[in-house]
Amino acid sequence: MSFRILLLTLFTFSATSAQEASEKGPLRWKSDIAAFEVRDAESPPAKDTLLFVGSSSIRMWDLNASWPETPTVNNGFGGSTLADSVHYFDRLFTRYEPAAIILYAGDNDINKGLTPDEVVADFKKLTALIADRFPETPVVYLAIKPSQARWELWPEMKAANDLIADLCGENDHWYFADTAASMLKGQEGAPPAQWFIADGLHLSPYGYEEWTRVVSEVLSEAGVKS
């Protein structure tokens, strides 16, 4: 192999490796974020919408069925973490004038090996951005859910929930929706199968009905009509 071909091969390998590495980070969501922008350009979101942001538990939620009388925006991108929402903050949040923001993230963070303290650190980064841009807007954080598929991680998830609940309690306009409590009511182990689809991770229609009830109660507490 000539020196020139060797250099070309090494350059190509390096470029490919760099691209693969970058697309394992937030850039892996670039097509999802672009799709939100196309959607909004084709159908501009209403003022005073309920803005939902987070991972697959948001993405798979039929918001129109849950809140048929209220405008909603679904900016859920499956598999995402709090850090991903921080990275794409401008494109996920700042183009809207929401009546309330509803967040679900942290589940994948713990599953990827982050500690509760690391999850809370990313939560603080996101809350700082939201508080600066939307100082008067109610924000509802949905508790990281217990699930059958990730039950072994529940102690770490609960620890993160407890820390985030405390932070929400210290800040005006922030609300902690303890969806996990209703999922574990009367349970000594993982929530029953009725909460989930076949994968034991993502919510079933029953699960979303219950989450809708909890979120609606918290929105009412926050003075948001839903």
Image (spheres, rainbow, N blue to C red):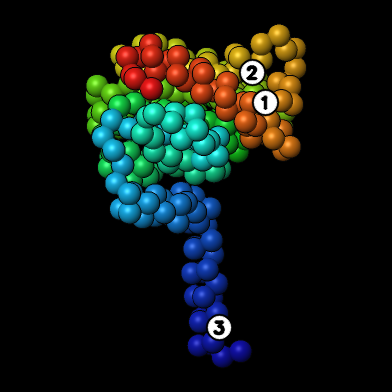
The percent position of residue 108, horizontal first and vertical second, equals: 57, 36
**Which is nearer the eye, 167 or 37?**
37
The numbered mark at residue 206 is none
**In the rendered image of this protein, does residue 168 appear above or below residue 105?**
above
Nearer mark to the viewer, of 3 and 2: 2
Q: Residue 20 is drawn in which quadrant? A: bottom right
Which residue is nearer to you in this view: 92 or 162? 92
**Quadrant in which residue 221 is drawn:** top left
Q: Secondary structure at mark 3?
A: helix
Identify the element where label 1 is drawn.
helix
Q: Earlier in the sequence, mark 1 or mark 2?
A: 2
Crowding at mark 2 (Cα within 10 Å: few <14, some 14-19, many 20+):
some
Horizontal placement of 46 versus 78: left or right? left
CB atoms of marks 1 and 3 within 8 Å? no
Q: Can you give x and y, in whole percent of width and height, for residue 65 in the image? A: 50, 33
Nearer mark to the viewer, of 1 and 3: 1
* Quadrant the N terminus occupies: bottom right
